[in-house]
Each structure stands twice: as structure tokens, then as C-alpha cells.
Amino acid sequence: MERLLSFRLILLAAVGGVCNANLNHRCLAGSETFACILPMFDYEPGEDIPVFHIPENVTSVRFIAPIYFVHESKSIIKVYDLVLHRQLNSPRAIELCGSYTTAVEIPSNLEYADFASNNIQQVCVPEGQSSALRYLDLNSNHHVRLDNISRLANLETLHLSGCEIESLPAGMFQNLNHLAHLTLSGNSMHRVDLSVFPVSITLLRLDRNWMTEFQFAGIGRYPLLEDLNIEYNDLDTLDIDALLAVAPNLRLFSVGRNPMKLTTLTSILNTLDKLYIAYYNMEQPSDQECDPGERRYRRACIPESSFSLDWLDWMELVMLFLAIVAVLFAVAIGGTKLWAHWQTRSHSVDVTVEAS
């Protein structure tokens, strides 16, 4: 009987220890000086509120995949809300990636937030709340709604690449007067109007979309814009003079990998060369290699289709050939007539000489 009672007590202690471990979380050893690294855990609003043992001087929290998995735990933080933020001692920086998170609430004191590679649909920013957020990464959140982004008035860097965005909501950037870096790569936008972006932009990435229209004529100037990337789109023409009038201080304009005619592209590159503006990107090792179906042209990767002739080009060549043939034929006819005329005159002179 005593052995059975002892076994039950040990079992209860073990279960209690596991439950306590599930609710009590500590920073991984060696990470507490200024940043706390925490293994992910299960959290959903309305459930048990987790308890954290975080040093007071910690201002940054980073979540990582758990070192070991607890039974019946999926380590999914479904929502990053104000309750969880307060339990973490209200850090100024948070990194929560790859946790299938579906919604986030932006606390007023948060300055840096990396929520990339989740399932975020809602970004909640209370109306009228002042926000200290300067950096927000929402890359690879395929169904994220962008309605509340305009409330983040102090935002300086915004990453929205790989979010399947087809169009940008009206007024999305109207209050973002400090926004400098904006990445919208790898989305599904067919038409982009430069005028929707704030004039504070210094870097704008629009590569890997489906753009067939890039509008910027007749809009205000963007004197701070230095880095513009429109590679991997479907643009077949571009008015480089109009663009440079709008963005006079461009330093890098990545324009390759668009199906432009070689003559059109050459004209653009000649203009950029005259103004010492770079037009090829070398940030990643992959930028140094052209993809299959591309050819390097003046250090930029260009689709093979840019070097092929379409039916209009062929028509121009045919017309040029016919014009050359016509000119040669006219020269031949004229030469024949001149020769005949010269022969006639020469014969007349010979007859006159003989008669004399």
C-alpha cells in the first residue's frame, strides 16, 4: 500500500513538473544579457497565461523552434497579443517567425517586429494609439490584410515580400512619412503607380511581380529615392527620361530580366551609363549568375527573347532589303542608260571623224 502511495505521489510530481514547465518559461542559458531567446510553445488567447522568468534589463525577445518537443504540444503561438507582450515584460523588439501565427497586436512601445513566414491575416493597431514601431517584417504571410498599416506613423522599414499582394489599398501609405525602405518583391501586382508611395522612400523593391505597367509620369518628385528594383517583371517599355525626372538621385536602378527589345534596353542603359547609375544588382551570389533562358548583356541578365526578332522587326528588315534592291535596280537601270548614251555619242564621234 505504501509503495502504491509513493508511486502516485511521484507520478503527480512528474505531471505537475511537466505542466509547470509548460507554463513557466526561462531564457536559454547565455542569452539573457540584452536579448532573451525562448523556445516556442502553445499559446492561444483565453487559455492559461504563460509565466516567464525574464531579467529586467532584457528588451528583445526571440522565439525559436523548441529544442525538444513536449507531448501533445505543437509549439504554435496562434496570436501575439497585448497579454502575451506584457507577460514578456513588454520588450521593444520581438522576433516570432514560422509559428503559424494568425494575428498580431502591435503594442505602443514595440519598435522592432519580425513576424515573417507565418499565417498572419490581421495586424491590429488600435485607432488613435501612438506607435513606436520603426521596423516591421511581414514577409511570406500570404493572406495578410494591410488596412491598418497606415496607423504605424513612425515606420521606417516595411517588408511585404511574398505576400501574394495583387494591389495596394488606397491610402495605405498616407501617414507613413518616415518610411524609407519598402520591399514588395515576389507578389502578384500587374500595375504599380509610383505616386502611392511616400516621398521619404530611399529603397523600393518591386522585383518578381507581374508588372506590365509602371506609372510615374506627371507625379511629384522623389528626391530621396536611390535604389529601385523592377527586375523579373513583364515590362516591355519604360521612359527612362521621365523616371529620372521624378527620381533625380537614383544610384541603382535594377532593370534587367524584363522582356524589352534590345534597342529599347540599350537606350535605357546608355542613359544610365552617362549618369553613372548602376543597373545590375550584386547583393546575392545568385545575382552574378543568369537564369536559364537569359543572356548577360553589359553585366545585366536579359531574356533571350530580347535578342530575337519579332514580326515587326522582320517586316522592317524585309522593307529595308526591298529598298536596297530597288536602289540597286535603279542604279543598274540608270547605269545601263548612261552606258547606252555614252556608246551612242562615242559612235557618233567616230562617224564624224571618218567623214572628215
Image (tube, rainbow, N blue to C red):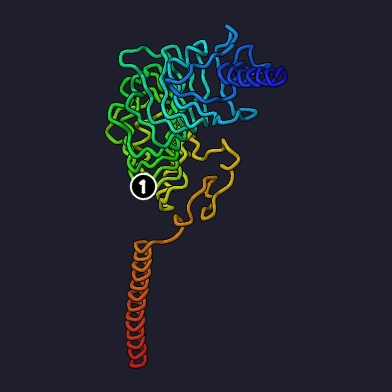
Pointer 1 local density, CA inside 10 Å: few below 14, some 14–19, many at least 20: some
Above/below status of 298 relative to 341: above
Expressed as whole percent of the image width and height from the top left, the position of residue 211 reads 37, 44
Quarter-of-image position of residue 45: top left
Callout count:
1
- Quadrant of the rendering where the N terminus is positioned: top right
Expressed as whole percent of the image width and height from the top left, the position of residue 65 reads 59, 29
User: What residue appears at the point 49 percent right and 50 percent down from the top-left corner?
Assistant: 302
Residue 168 lies left or right of residue 43; in this view the side is left
Identify the residue position indicated by label 1 in the image.
Answer: 237
Q: As drawn, which residue projects farthest toward the bottom? A: 355
Could you tell me the amino acid type at mark 1? Thr
User: What residue appears at the point 36 percent right and 12 percent down from the top-left corner?
Assistant: 130
Q: Is residue 141 visible?
A: yes
Q: Is residue 270 visible?
A: no
Say which of 165 and 281 sits in front: 165
User: What residue appears at the point 32 percent right and 80 percent down from the top-left corner?
Assistant: 337
Expressed as whole percent of the image width and height from the top left, the position of residue 56 reads 57, 6
Say which of 279 and 206 sits in front: 206
Expressed as whole percent of the image width and height from the top left, the position of residue 279 reads 49, 39
- Quadrant of the rendering where the C terminus is positioned: bottom left
Circle 1 sits in a helix, a strand or a loop, which is it?
A: loop
Say which of 228 and 58 sits in front: 58
Say which of 11 and 229 sits in front: 11
Residue 35 lies left or right of residue 204; in this view the side is right
Above/below status of 162 relative to 316: above
Q: As drawn, which residue projects farthest toward the front? A: 1
Q: As drawn, which residue projects farthest toward the right? A: 3
